[in-house]
Each structure stands twice: as structure tokens, then as C-alpha cells.
Amino acid sequence: MNQHPPPLVRAEGLHKSYGHRQAIRGIDLAIWPGETVAIIGPNGAGKSTLLDLLLGLRQPDGGKVHYSLPEPRRQIGLQLQNAPLFAGFTVLENLRMFAACYGLRCKKAELLAMLERCGLGEAAHTNAAHLSGGQQKWLAIAIALVHQPRLLFLDEPAAALDPRARRQMRSWIAELAAEGVSVVLTSHDMDEVQQVADRILLLQDGHIVAEGTAEALLATSGTSSLEDMYLKYTDTKEEVRGV
């Protein structure tokens, strides 16, 4: 009998409060190898707090996060909205410095290949502070990938990108999934979510109000677009789970 691999991350009964405000209320979820999961929801719904809990950046008030990854901190990559770049260093030097933080001594050719894949080959020797917003986003992604993680968290990866770069981003996420990397992303771009996500989690007021594939959520909600589905369940707070 074939056994399915365990989830890379499993969260059980997560709760997190800030003072009297409940940011996360009893969330259960699992992230499986090779899948792309989109976490969507209004501002203040709990998306950032949920990511912090999954990453171990914050400790839950209740519940647990389990990893099947050995040395999870070395197996997880994180792209932030505002990457903490080393001031005064070039793009290539920044990537080398972050690789060193993981104990890696990468060859120059390896680092340049990573930058080329992220569209930064010609900017390798540019001061990172002089990059455009979109280029800084790609550098943040290169940094998140430099140690070849099995699980990648992307925070609004297409934000600040022009239409061509957004299309490149979607293709790149699909390539990662094809390589077996699990991707968890937050996004307000429903077109992006529909194109890249195998599974969608809709958060509202700290809990999951809708979960499933795009097709299942549209069928269950009786809507014709993810945007309409989003508006329906964030307005009514009605709970529905797809398959």
C-alpha cells in the first residue's frame, strides 16, 4: 500500500490574542509537499499573524504547530514585503551575505545563476539600495531561495510588479511547485490566486471561513469569480468549505 508523505507543516487549534483582540481563533491546517496554498482575506483578518505562527516568529496562546521537516529553519524560505538588505552592498554581495547566514559558501556562478533566474542578472553589481521596488521584490525572493528550501512563504509576491513581471512571477511559482517546493502565499490579487493556487484559505476575523480549490469554492458559493466569492463570505461571514 502506498503511503502519502506527511504534511510539511500541520497546525492544530491555533489561538493568538493581542490584549483583548483575538487575532487567530482555533485554526487547523496542513501544508502538503509540492502544493501551492494561497491565504486570502481582508486587512486585519489574521493573515500576517497566522504566517508568524507557522514560521515560529510568534508563539501561539493555544494550539501547536508541527513540522515534519528536519531542522525546519534551514528548510523554510521567507520573502518579506520589505527585505532587510545590507546597506551599501551590491545585489550579488547581499545574496552572498544571506547565504552565509545559512552557513553556505556558494560559488559566484551559483549566486549569479540564482539572480539570473529572478531577472536580476544585469543588476548583480548594482547597489541594492538603487533597485526599483519590483527589483527589490525579486531580490527578496532570491534571498528566500538561496538555501534551496522545501517550503517557501511569500508575502504579497506580485505587489509593486508591473503586468509583465506579475506574469513572470506566476510562471516562477508554477516552476517551483513542479520542482516539489511547497509555496504558501498571501495575496489580494484574485487573478493571481486563481492561476497559481492548488488550495485557497479565506480568513475572516481570525478563522478560516472558506477552504478548497478555486473551482470548489466557486461552485459551493454560487459565484462566478473568486472576487465575488471573497466579497460574499467576507460580507456575510458565512462559513463554507470546498473540497
Image (cartoon, grey):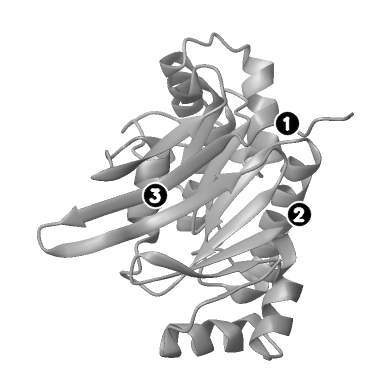
Q: Which mark is residue 171?
A: 2
Question: Circles 3 and 2: CB distance less than 8 Å?
Answer: no
> Left or right: 132 with respect to 180?
left
Q: In x, y percent, where is residue 24?
A: 32, 58
Q: Amino acid at mark 2?
A: Ser
Name which quarter of the figure residue 235 lies in: bottom left
The image quadrant where one finds the N terminus is top right
Mark 1 or mark 2, which is nearer the start of the sequence? Answer: 1
Mark 3 vs mark 1, foreground winner is 3
Residue at the disc numbered 1: 5
Identify the element where label 2 is drawn. Answer: helix
Q: In x, y percent, where is residue 52?
A: 35, 45
Q: In x, y percent, where is residue 161?
A: 56, 63
Identify the element where label 3 is drawn. Answer: strand
Q: Which mark is residue 208?
A: none
Q: Decide which of 72, 219 is in the foreground and name it.
A: 219
